[in-house]
């Protein structure tokens, strides 16, 4: 009854003023070439990304629907398997016939926004943007992301919307805002994890060695369970040339840890099964960030201390607490034509143990496995630091924008070099050419390659060139 | 010819010597502004080959009783810049630093415009020949200002004022080492400005066209910024301008900047 009254109230509000309708979106055909791949994956993504948004504005109320569509048709003409259906979350639909042949439809936004005095209330599926740093935002975890399941070329494309109730209290005199967010549906990052069973040793009767089986179980990527509900609080202040925010988020880890168990079925030969169950544990994330604009410098910092389920660091298969930060310094030259920035991003893992800290070879092997399973997002080192440099040019009155980026992980000794050139062909038409090169200074047979995000064979999406044309309407 | 022009300026400078520079600046900076206005604007960006891009803007502005001014620009077209919003808070009090903020829809974030970073004050304003700094005012505290003479433009006598940056920080903030302005001696409106870079080279020239008094308030039809280095220009024109007795304060908040409502 309450819901009906609320709906009637909203309908009355919408009817009170002539609503304004806004329709917009984009189409983005993309072609990717991976020169180092074999012929079957030479074109890992060639297809279309599309976005459509529909907004109704009536008085102070607004209602928005945002849809994302994705079609990777690079596998056309090749032998396809059966179309498989997957839900990364209840309103994210994905059909896959091959790695390079898949379709996706995602309800990214679906919310009602209403102001009550100085408070903005937004209810429904939405996207949040936390963090004052540029691009690398350790506090920005309220939305899960697509990692490795589709090719994306912008941060916003990576983000999945989350169902949430968000209230923002806007402080007077443009001082800032305090926001509180409640997320009843917890969703993990969209990862290319699939259940499988693999026989790694067939077993033998003489000598008696059991059959060795690895079972990798299904990753439950979303949960409505009350114990998995999430939330966040953030206070953001604009203080002249200094801005800062403090935040707290309690979320289920967006990346999985693992429950590992073994079982032995006696027989001749027996079956020894090792089972891995991807699981997510709660994280308490305490964030702080700032921006200082002074004397021609733009200085930004962002940090988060994360309390995980394994506070003591005793469980090999769970992440330890950690501190993650980023410090960026940038400066413009030639009247804004060139913006040069340097960034330092350290991560410190509490109670860290490396494989060499274990004398038991089985335990040592498990640590190596965990870091491999974590696909470069694990905790391979007690202290890791990424350094990066970026040169961004704005030429011909923002018509031409070349951009070069180099990121190097000091401990993992792997790197990413990327170049993009964006050209504004005409109003609402933009052409982007890009190239990414991933590498590692470690030899290919070095197991430590699995500890870094760019040298890791599982996460390394491969060197590639891409061309995308974007039309906004 | 150039020397002749300089001589003319010197002569006229002596003629207007009695004119109090402070009084001219006071009149220039304290033009009778409407308490509020709503405008539809077009920003036409034309490169040296004559190719043109256009941006449609909705603007709201407000002048407070203490002389502070506020303006918000909302880009409505084309689609790739739609919903980009830009807020300027200009304080009359020299002790307070003016503020500029931009909301970029693709990032879903508000960013303050500083002297560096992705959107620096001296960088291009959304691809136009205006910089973010050009959208603000030339603060007296930042410049040594001189009346260098008078010159007739369109048959009307204009004071020629020279603004010289006091230090390198000011040059960093504005992008110019020197600015010369032509100020109408009858209505004290700015008609033309020439902008010199740190090395003293003339880099840009702006012209204000169609100045008129409407309901007691000065308005102009367009401002044209010529970029002498690239050969391009940007014409910022008013398609419609409505003077309002008052305006909702919400337009000039970071809340509006982020939400658009």
Image (spheres, rainbow, N blue to C red):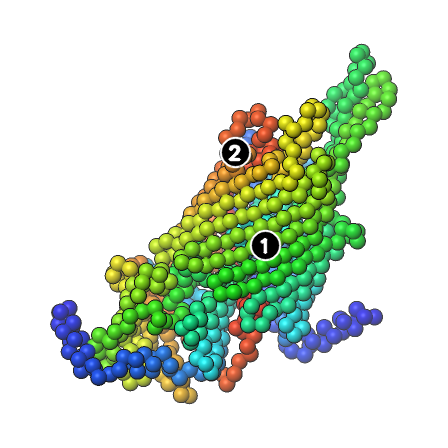
Residue at screen point 63% across, 48% down: A305
- Horizontal side of residue A367 vs B140, given as left or right: right
Out of A142 and B19, give the one closest to the viewer.
B19
Disc 2 packing (10 Å; few <14; some 14–19; many ≥20): many
In what quadrant of the picture does the C terminus of chain A appear?
A: bottom right
Instruction: Decide which of tag 2 and tag 1 comes sooner along the chain.
Output: 1
Question: Residue tagged by mark 2?
Answer: A413
In what quadrant of the picture does the N terminus of chain A appear?
A: bottom right
**Vertical arrangement, residue A382 with respect to residue B206, above or below:** above
Q: What residue occupies the far right of the structure in this picture?
A: A267
Which quadrant of the structure image shows residue A384? top right
- Horizontal side of residue A42 vs A341, given as left or right: right
Residue at screen point 32% across, 84% down: B187
Position in image of residue B92 (x %, y %): 42, 76
Q: What residue occupies the far top of the structure in this picture?
A: A206
Do the residues bearing badges 2 and 1 touch, measured as CB atoms within 8 Å? no
Which quadrant of the structure image shows residue B97? bottom left
Q: Secondary structure at mark 2?
A: loop
Q: Identify the subunit bearing mark 2.
A: A
Cα gap from disc 2 to disc 1, whole angstroms: 28 Å
Residue at screen point 86% across, 20% down: A267
- Horizontal side of residue B19 vs A227, given as left or right: left
Disc 1 packing (10 Å; few <14; some 14–19; many ≥20): many
Position in image of residue B260 (x %, y %): 56, 68
Position in image of residue A291 (x %, y %): 51, 57
Q: Nearer the viewer, mark 2 or mark 1?
A: 1
Query: Is residue B25 at least partly visible in the picture?
Result: yes
Q: Which mark is residue A288?
A: 1
Q: Identify the subunit bearing mark 1.
A: A
Q: Which mark is residue A8?
A: none
């Amino acid at each position: 009854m309450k819901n009906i009254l609320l709906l009637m109230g909203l309908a009355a509000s919408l009817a009170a003023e002539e609503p304004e309708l806004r329709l917009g979106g984009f189409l983005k055909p993309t072609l990717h070439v991976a020169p180092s791949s074999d012929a079957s994956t030479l074109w890992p993504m060639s297809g279309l990304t599309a976005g459509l948004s529909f907004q109704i504005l009536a008085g102070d109320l607004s209602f928005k629907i945002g849809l994302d569509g994705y079609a990777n048709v690079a596998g056309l003409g090749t032998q396809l398997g059966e179309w498989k259906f997957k839900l990364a979350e209840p309103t994210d639909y994905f059909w896959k016939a091959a790695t390079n042949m898949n379709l996706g439809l995602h309800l990214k936004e679906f919310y009602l926004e209403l102001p009550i005095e100085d408070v903005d209330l937004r209810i429904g599926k939405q996207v949040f943007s936390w963090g004052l740093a540029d691009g690398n935002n350790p506090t920005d975890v309220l939305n899960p992301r697509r990692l490795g399941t589709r090719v994306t070329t912008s941060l916003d494309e990576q983000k999945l919307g989350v169902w949430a109730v968000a209230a923002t209290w806007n402080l007077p005199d443009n001082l800032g805002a305090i926001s509180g967010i409640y997320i009843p549906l917890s969703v993990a990052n969209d990862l290319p994890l699939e259940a499988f069973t693999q026989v790694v040793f067939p077993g033998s009767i003489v000598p008696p060695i059991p059959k060795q089986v690895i079972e990798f179980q299904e990753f439950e990527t979303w949960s409505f369970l009350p114990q998995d509900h999430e939330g966040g609080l953030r206070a953001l202040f604009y203080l002249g040339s200094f801005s800062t925010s403090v935040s707290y988020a309690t979320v289920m880890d967006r990346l999985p840890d693992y429950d590992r168990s073994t079982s032995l079925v006696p027989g001749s030969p027996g079956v020894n099964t090792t089972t891995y169950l991807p699981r997510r544990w709660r994280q308490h994330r305490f964030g702080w960030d700032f921006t200082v604009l002074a004397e021609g410098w733009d200085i930004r910092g962002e940090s988060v201390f994360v309390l995980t389920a394994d506070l003591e660091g005793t469980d090999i298969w769970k992440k330890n607490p950690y501190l993650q930060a980023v410090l960026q310094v940038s400066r413009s030259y030639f009247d804004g034509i060139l913006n040069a920035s340097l960034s330092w991003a350290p991560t410190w893992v509490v109670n860290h143990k490396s494989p060499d800290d274990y004398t038991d070879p089985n335990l040592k092997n498990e640590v190596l496995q965990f870091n491999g399973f974590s696909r470069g997002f694990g905790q391979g080192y007690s202290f890791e630091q990424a350094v990066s440099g970026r040169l961004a040019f704005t030429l011909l009155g923002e018509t031409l924008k070349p951009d070069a980026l180099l990121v190097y992980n000091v401990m993992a000794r792997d790197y990413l070099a990327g170049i993009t050139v964006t050209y504004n062909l005409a109003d609402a038409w933009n052409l982007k050419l890009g190239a990414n090169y991933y590498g590692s200074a470690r030899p290919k047979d070095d197991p430590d390659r699995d500890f870094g995000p760019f040298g890791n064979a599982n996460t390394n999406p491969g060197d590639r060139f891409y061309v995308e044309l974007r039309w906004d309407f | 010819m150039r020397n002749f022009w300089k001589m003319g300026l010197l002569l006229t400078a002596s003629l207007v010597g009695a004119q109090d520079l402070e009084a001219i600046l006071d009149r220039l900076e304290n033009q009778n502004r409407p308490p509020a206005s709503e405008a539809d604007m077009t920003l036409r960006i034309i490169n040296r080959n004559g190719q043109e891009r256009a941006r449609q803007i909705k603007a709201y502005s407000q002048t407070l009783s203490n002389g502070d001014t506020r303006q918000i620009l909302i880009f409505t077209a084309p689609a790739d810049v739609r919903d980009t919003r830009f807020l300027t808070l200009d304080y009359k009090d020299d002790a307070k630093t003016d503020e500029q903020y931009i909301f970029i829809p693709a990032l879903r974030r508000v960013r303050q415009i500083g002297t560096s970073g992705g959107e620096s004050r001296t960088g291009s304003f959304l691809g136009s020949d205006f910089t973010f700094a050009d959208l603000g005012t030339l603060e007296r505290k930042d410049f040594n200002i001189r009346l260098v003479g008078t010159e007739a433009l369109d048959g009307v006598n204009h004071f020629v004022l020279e603004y010289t940056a006091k230090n390198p920080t000011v040059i960093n903030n504005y992008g110019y080492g020197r600015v010369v302005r032509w100020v109408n001696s009858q209505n004290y409106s700015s008609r033309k400005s020439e902008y010199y870079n740190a090395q003293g080279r003339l880099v840009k020239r702006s012209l204000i066209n169609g100045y008129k008094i409407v309901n007691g308030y000065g308005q102009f039809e367009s401002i044209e910024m010529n970029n002498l280095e690239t050969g391009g220009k940007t014409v910022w024109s008013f398609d419609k301008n409505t003077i309002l007795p008052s305006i909702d304060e919400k337009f000039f908040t970071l809340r509006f900047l982020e939400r658009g409502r």
